[in-house]
Image (cartoon, grey):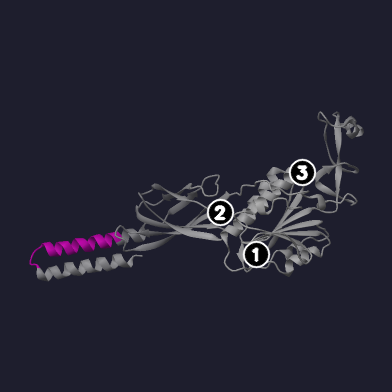
């Protein structure tokens, strides 16, 4: 705000004007003239400065929950005029939890000079910390004139969950049906009726898997990996909508922690699965097959960056509509909101449905209308979900 400075300057100039009458000396007019000169010169400089201001935001490559992140705002002045004062508002937001706040950073830049202003932020919850500055205010030295200058700088850093293994039982056992004629695209098996992949022979491979005809053509011993028959894939449907009032950051954090733990446990048991969620910014249903650690962290990164939107439609209906001819043998629906008729729709596709719901009141397995539900609390989700059969 510049009006307090303008009021102060106006009072000062009025005082100097009164001195012209009250004091018969050259000091009064000299003081008034110099004050007007300084005010006008400062104002003109403030109106012209900052026209070629640029900015960039520096964030660390990695972050952890609760850690203080050393960040910096770098400014450059491409003009021949100095920037006596630049006020840059920086918006900080975590789309996963809905948390946001603003920082006000000030700097002074010499002609064609640069400035780097460090600042620190932290997030008590996992997610993706997004920082952005879309403009700045260039002020004169006295703070009487303020001109807005356009800036376009942003940066973000992921704050991942711990991905601790979750003690599930028979994870993925109901996701596969060996009587099916559909085969997994991401997991080898023992069914010689379908070839999963062909690769070079390594020590320990069975001689019965050698592809003799192809080996003779390429001049190297090649082996055939058999396919794994499945009814369909195990799907983890992560809800990104919110319909219970204000988004609870600790619930959203716990939801993501459980998602990462569940995915990590399934991967350790060599169970390929599919992660499904709705990107509420675009309305697109995102699907990712996960059968390796890189694919796991790619899926987690996309989930961290996906905003949770209050009042948006639940993800169940668009997820079901996106399946086309697919059949999910087992769906794990992970949500931090209230359950309604949408969850029952999942069981109508013929597969099993397990709902993992964040709540302040955890509970053991409960049979609902077409699905099983287990509630977990943010502070005790590991013990609440230990032994859950998937």
Measure the alpha-carbon separation of dots 2 and 3: 29 Å
Mark 2 vs 3, N-terminal side? 2
Residue 190 placement (x, y as % from top left): 87, 41
Q: Could you tell me residue 214's position as x and y percent?
A: 89, 34
Per the rendering, the mark at residue 125 is 2
Q: Which mark is residue 83?
A: none
Q: Residues within 10 Å of mark 1 (few under 14, many from 20)?
A: many
Q: Is residue 70 magenta?
A: no
- Examine the image and state in which quarter residue 307 appears: bottom right
Dot 2 falls on a residue whose secondary structure is loop
Q: Which residues are magenta?
A: 23-42
Say which mark, if any, is on residue 270: 3
Pointer 1: what residue? 337
Q: Earlier in the sequence, mark 1 or mark 2?
A: 2
Q: Position of residue 155 (x, y in %)?
A: 53, 51
Q: Is residue 305 visible?
A: no
- Label 3 sits on a secondary structure element that is loop
- For the residues labelled 1 and 3, the Cα–Cα distance comes to 30 Å
Residue 8 in picture, x, y percent from top left: 26, 66
- Which quadrant holds the N terminus? bottom left
Residue placed furthest toward the front: 364
């Amino acid at each position: 705000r510049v009006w307090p400075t303008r009021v102060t300057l106006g009072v000062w100039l009025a005082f100097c004007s009164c001195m012209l009458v009250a004091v018969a000396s050259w000091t009064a007019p000299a003081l008034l003239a110099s004050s007007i000169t300084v005010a006008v010169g400062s104002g003109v400089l403030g109106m012209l400065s900052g026209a070629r201001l640029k900015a960039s935001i520096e964030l660390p490559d990695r972050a952890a929950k609760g850690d203080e992140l050393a960040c910096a705002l770098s400014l450059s002045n491409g003009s021949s005029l100095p920037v006596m004062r630049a006020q840059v508002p920086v918006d900080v937001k975590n789309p996963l939890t809905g948390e946001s706040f603003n920082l006000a950073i000030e700097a002074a830049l010499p002609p064609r000079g640069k400035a780097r202003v460090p600042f620190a932020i932290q997030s008590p919850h996992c997610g993706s910390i997004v920082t952005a500055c879309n403009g700045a205010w260039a002020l004169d030295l006295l703070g009487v004139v303020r001109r807005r200058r356009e800036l376009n700088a942003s940066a973000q850093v992921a704050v991942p969950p711990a991905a601790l293994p979750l003690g599930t039982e028979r994870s993925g056992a109901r996701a596969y049906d060996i009587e099916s004629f559909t085969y997994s695209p991401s997991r080898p098996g023992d069914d010689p009726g379908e070839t999963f992949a062909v690769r070079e022979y390594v020590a320990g491979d069975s001689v019965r898997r050698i592809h003799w005809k192809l080996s003779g053509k390429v001049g190297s011993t090649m082996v055939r990996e058999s396919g794994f028959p499945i009814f369909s894939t195990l799907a983890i449907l992560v809800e990104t909508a919110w319909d219970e009032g204000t988004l609870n950051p600790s619930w959203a954090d716990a939801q993501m922690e459980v998602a990462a733990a569940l995915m990590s446990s399934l991967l350790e048991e060599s169970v390929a699965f599919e992660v499904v969620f709705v990107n509420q910014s675009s309305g697109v249903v995102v699907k990712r097959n996960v059968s390796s650690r890189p694919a796991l962290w790619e899926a987690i990164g996309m989930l961290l960056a996906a905003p949770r939107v209050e009042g948006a439609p639940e993800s169940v209906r668009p997820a079901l509509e996106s399946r086309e001819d697919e059949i999910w043998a087992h769906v794990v629906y992970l949500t931090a909101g209230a359950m309604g008729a949408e969850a029952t729709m999942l069981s109508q596709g013929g597969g099993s449905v397990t709902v993992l719901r964040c709540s302040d009141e955890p509970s053991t397995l409960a049979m609902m209308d077409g699905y099983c539900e287990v509630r977990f609390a943010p502070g005790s989700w590991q013990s609440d979900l230990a032994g859950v059969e998937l």
